[in-house]
């Protein structure tokens, strides 16, 4: 019995000692550590860095509660990853309410980049709930992208999805739908969002729209107004536009867009009224300031084929470049000034300086002739002209008088494929070879050329009908007659009878008894000089 009592006493003593030790250990542990989820965290620390550990938000919250004086750093679990709690910017491609709740664990966060996120509702909520954050995102509306700071949106189209997306723009105050045709949706938008200023077209250039109107007349309307306004008038049958701000191409496009509406317009240019179907617009009574001004005027007329302007002050070469630029659309016509007395419109078909009292057309004026590309007949005989480069720019030239001039080089004339009648008498031409390119030439006068020039190039011109040449040797005359059997050859020599008995090479005038001479004088509006 004594032994049992001693053993029990010893056991109790051991347990008491163990309990005391445990209590002491527990006391010291709780005094220097915080226990959370069976983990020990040291107390009374200014900074506790847990970024190398896996810590749940619940553990973090408990630690914050139990260690109020300690700055705790940790990696925050967010969207499947973990981020340092000191992160200043986060990028998201999706966003949920749970994600929003986790943002409180980033006390230094400054920016959330959601440019590639389409959870616009949650992004708007984030923007509203966290004004201290810069929230970046872009909402698509009618094909354009808008950020949360947007205050005004301009619409050219509208869908219900667009209407929903507009609600994700927290600072929006104004919607400009004056260029949008979806009137029912615009009205609905204005009714459901009275806090916004929603504008849409109710008139065209001050003329009120009516959905039931069958005819409409407006003044000074733009294409945008007309295009949108007609969409609001389904019963419209006729539209008349006075002095539109739209171009002719835009108005023609409007006709295509609304084929059931008869659309007409008139345009005032320098005080003149022209109808929309005008093919020729003559405003030569007023000077244009620039080529751009001419283009703007021309743009009003979709059927334009000729624009006649006063281009005084604009260089002829600039005008020619403009003419070439728009040639496939319409013809530009202006007046070329040679001297105070002499001028020519670029679409005129004949030119004779003496007809205007200019008796001495000079070489310095020749260059500007090239701009008169429609010339059919030119008489600049008895002048000081030396060069004829201008003929290269006259594809339809038929009658050309260069008699009694100082022209030596006739190379450019080879381009005159329609030339019928040519006077080169009393000139100083050095080479007739270029004449071989004039394959339509019928009547040629090279009589009394003071320079001894070879007539060999003429021997191939079998298409000639009448040829006047200076005095030639018998051999040369015989060669001409043989080479040109269908040509009447006239020289200054006395009448010659050839071996075959013909007298086709005769002396005499008769140059002004030719049909082409009469036709040429008719072109010039002059009397005949037989």
Image (spheres, helix red, strand yellow):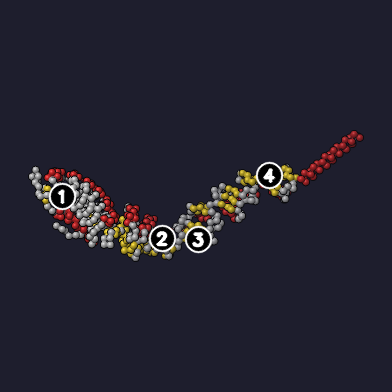
- Give how far across and how far down residue 434 sits, in percent: 23, 47
| For marks 2 and 4 on the same chain, the one whose residue lies earlier in the sequence | 4
Hey, which residue is sitting farthest left in the picture? 501
| For marks 3 and 4 on the same chain, the one whose residue lies earlier in the sequence | 4
| For marks 3 and 2 on the same chain, the one whose residue lies earlier in the sequence | 3
Alpha-carbon distance for marks 2 and 4?
68 Å
- Give how far across and how far down residue 112 sits, in percent: 59, 50
| Comparing labels 2 and 4, the label whose residue is closer to the camera | 4
> Residues at badges 3 and 4 in contact (C-beta under 8 Å)?
no
Give me the residue at 74% from left, 48% from top.
44
Residue underneath mark 2: 222
Q: Which label number is shown at residue 50?
A: 4
Alpha-carbon distance for marks 3 and 1?
90 Å
Q: Which label number is shown at residue 198?
A: 3
Tag 3 secondary structure? strand
**Residue closer to the observer: 349 or 16:** 349
| For marks 4 and 1 on the same chain, the one whose residue lies earlier in the sequence | 4
Reply above or below: 364 against 74. below
- Give how far across and how far down residue 521 sits, in percent: 19, 57
Q: Which label number is shown at residue 470?
A: 1
Alpha-carbon distance for marks 3 and 4?
54 Å
- Crowd band around label 1 with a 10 angstrom C-alpha radius: few (<14), some (14–19), many (20+): some
């Amino acid at each position: 019995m004594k032994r049992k009592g001693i053993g029990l006493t010893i056991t109790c003593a051991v347990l008491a000692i163990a309990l005391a030790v445990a209590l002491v250990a527990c006391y010291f542990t709780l005094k220097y550590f915080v226990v959370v989820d069976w983990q020990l965290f040291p107390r009374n620390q200014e900074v506790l860095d847990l970024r190398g550990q896996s810590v749940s938000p619940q553990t973090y919250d408990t630690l914050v509660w139990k260690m109020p004086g300690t700055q705790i750093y940790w990696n925050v679990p967010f969207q499947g990853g973990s981020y340092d709690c000191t992160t200043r910017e986060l990028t998201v491609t999706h966003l949920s309410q749970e994600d929003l709740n986790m943002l409180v664990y980033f006390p230094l966060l400054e920016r959330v980049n959601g440019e590639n996120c389409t959870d616009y509702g949650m992004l708007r909520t984030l923007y509203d709930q966290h004004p201290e954050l810069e929230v970046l995102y872009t909402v698509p509306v009618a094909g354009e992208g808008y950020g949360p700071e947007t205050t005004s949106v301009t619409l050219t189209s509208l869908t219900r999805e667009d209407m929903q997306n507009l609600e994700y723009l927290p600072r929006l105050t104004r919607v400009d739908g004056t260029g949008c045709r979806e009137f029912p949706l615009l009205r609905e938008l204005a009714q459901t969002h009275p806090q916004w200023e929603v504008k849409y077209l109710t008139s065209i250039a001050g003329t009120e729209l009516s959905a039931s109107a069958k005819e409409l007349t407006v003044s000074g309307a733009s294409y945008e107004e007309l295009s949108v306004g007609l969409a609001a008038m389904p019963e419209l049958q006729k539209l008349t536009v006075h002095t539109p701000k739209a171009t002719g191409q835009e108005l023609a496009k409007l006709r295509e867009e609304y084929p059931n509406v008869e659309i007409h317009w008139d345009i005032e240019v320098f005080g003149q009224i022209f109808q929309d179907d005008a093919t020729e617009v003559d405003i030569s009574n007023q000077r244009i300031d620039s080529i751009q001004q001419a283009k703007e005027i021309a743009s009003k007329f979709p059927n334009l084929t000729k624009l006649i302007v006063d281009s005084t002050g604009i260089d002829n070469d600039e005008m020619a470049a403009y003419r070439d630029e728009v040639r496939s659309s319409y013809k530009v016509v202006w007046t070329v000034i040679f001297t105070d007395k002499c001028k020519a419109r670029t679409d005129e078909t004949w030119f004779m300086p003496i007809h205007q009292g200019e008796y001495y057309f000079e070489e310095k004026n020749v260059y500007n002739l090239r701009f008169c590309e429609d010339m059919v007949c030119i008489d600049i005989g008895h002048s000081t002209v030396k060069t004829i480069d201008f003929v290269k720019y006259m594809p339809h030239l038929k009658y050309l008088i260069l008699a009694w001039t100082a022209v030596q080089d006739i190379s450019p004339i080879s381009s005159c494929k329609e030339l019928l009648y040519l006077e080169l008498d009393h000139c100083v031409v050095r080479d007739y070879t270029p004449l071989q390119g004039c394959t339509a030439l019928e009547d040629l006068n090279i009589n009394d050329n003071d320079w001894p020039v070879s007539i060999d190039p003429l021997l191939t011109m079998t298409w000639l009908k009448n040829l006047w040449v200076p005095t030639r040797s018998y051999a040369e005359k015989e060669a001409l007659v043989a080479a040109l059997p269908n040509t009447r050859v006239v020289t200054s020599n006395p009448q010659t009878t050839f071996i075959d008995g013909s007298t086709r090479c005769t002396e005499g005038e008769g140059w002004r008894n030719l049909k082409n001479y009469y036709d040429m004088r008719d072109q010039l509006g002059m009397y005949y000089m037989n």
